[in-house]
Image (cartoon, helix red, strand yellow):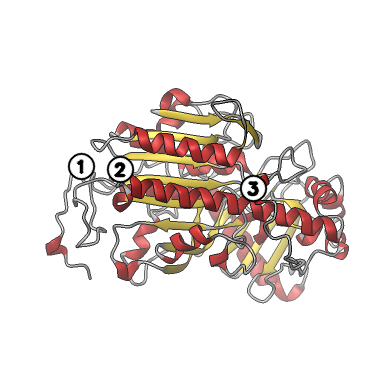
Amino acid sequence: MMDMSRISIHFVNLGLAVAAVGTLSLAYPHVLLARLQPDACVSSTERPNIIFLLTDDHRWDALGYAGNGIIQTPELDKLAANGIYFKNAYVTTSICCVSRASILSGQYASRHQIHDFATEMSDEALQHTYPLLLKQSGYYTGFIGKYGVGEKMPENRFDKWYGFPGQGSYHQQDSLGRGIHLTALMRNQADAFLESTTRDRPFCLSISFKAPHTERGDAFIADSATRYLYALDTLPVPVTAGDSYFEAFPDFFKRNNEARIRWQVLFPTPDQFQENVKKYYRLITEVDQVVGAIREKLAELKLARNTVILFMSDNGFYMGEHGLAGKWYGHEESVRVPLIIYDPRIPARQRGQIRNEIALNIDVAPTILAMAGVAIPREMQGRDLMRLLEQPTPVWRDDFFYEHMFTANDRIPRSEGVIGRRYKYLRYIDFDYEVLYDIESDPHEITNLASQPAYGNLLDTMRDRYGELKQAAK
């Protein structure tokens, strides 16, 4: 236990918010910093600075710390080794516009009702997102990069705004009109924001990368500076990359499927697979370099000791698994993402943890608010992830509701379901087609057990759980 006599804990506005069914959202004291390292050179009543880094289409295993022996992510690996790494992190909807709305709001899509690229957050909904709540509580706020929720930008809601609408482009110009890669430009914008901060206000900076998303859906455009990276590597081909795995899908799924269309552009031959995955890796390495630059800037400005860094992706990405590219569906490649929390204030004995609990994108907002001592709104359905450090055997979720309603003009079959530690149940709702995987014994999700009589009782159980979670997500 931490020696609480050595920490001054400041309580203001103690509150409790009862969250939706199945959540544990607590509204903590307005300033509750019991997680501070006892000998840290930071006042215990000082609220932390917060940087949230979000990549786009970055699958969980495209990270050195996750066991990938080829990709180079030394800065992210250091964050994980000295922070908290969530091995089983997922998104509740695997598409950028919906997932980013869930990250901002702490809500399932069933509640925030953003299911496409055109729908915007209402003014009332924006007021209950983590950046605006932090600003209302005195934080200096900034946003850099891809906003991704509707076309109308909320630039007047932030103190510093460097965001852009839509998908953006990797081809940019700097202040002198010279060509510059988007990721490099965002690094410069991060420096500018950090240099504009003052010691009398804590800050929250949200950086939303386009990387490693494709340009126009058909090409990974990395910076020319990294063009030699991975040139001599031979990347392993996924177990389920063969055509037979795509042919195993039902007819409705194979008909004009967006994920198959993109596979035909990105991964149809072994050479194209090698070329495009290497470019994807280069984009991630470039983000990693920005992470290192940000940490150097924090140290230069003497802000590092009190700045928390969170890192996540808005969804995963198929690298040819099941004959697909893109995301959208409920396979691990699509829904599982990296998640790291680096908090320099916590005791050394709590650092370097690998957590096995299921963490979700809807957990980001309540976690950030709790760190800042801001009450978590009742509307938020996620949980404060740092509570896992406070209990030896925490009560936590064992499964979650997955939903994807965006159809892309009927090229993406809509799906819902339950993703748990061992079993995964998915239902393509417009075709009444069910999928049941045992992801413990079948990690590549090859065998659909839904039609096998021996699994009838389990299928009924998963159907019931699906109904419960669907209702709770509203």
Residue 461, disc:
none
Q: Nearer the viewer, residue 32 or 114?
A: 32
Which quadrant, please, contains the N terminus? bottom left
Q: Which residue is mark 1?
A: 13
Q: Earlier in the sequence, mark 2 or mark 3?
A: 3
Residue 225, disc:
3
- Marks 3 and 1, how far apart at CA: 51 Å
Under circle 3, the secondary element is helix
Amino acid under disc 3? Ala
Across and down, in percent, residue 17 comes to 32, 46
Q: Is residue 214 visible?
A: yes
Q: Is the Cβ of the residue at disc 2 closer than 8 Å to that at disc 1? A: yes
User: Relative to 64, is 246 on the left or the right?
Assistant: right
Q: Is the Cβ of the residue at disc 3 closer than 8 Å to that at disc 1? A: no
Q: Earlier in the sequence, mark 2 or mark 1?
A: 1
Amino acid under disc 1? Asn
Judge whether 358 appears above or below 152 on screen.
below
Under circle 1, the secondary element is loop
For disc 3, the neighbor class at 10 Å (few under 14, some 14 to 19, many from 20) is few
Q: Nearer the viewer, residue 234 or 57?
A: 234
Amino acid under disc 2? Ala
Judge whether 3 appears above or below 58 on screen.
below
User: Relative to 108, is 262 on the left or the right?
Assistant: right
Judge whether 314 appears above or below 140 on screen.
below
**Residue depicted at x 46% and y 34%:** 143
Under circle 2, the secondary element is loop
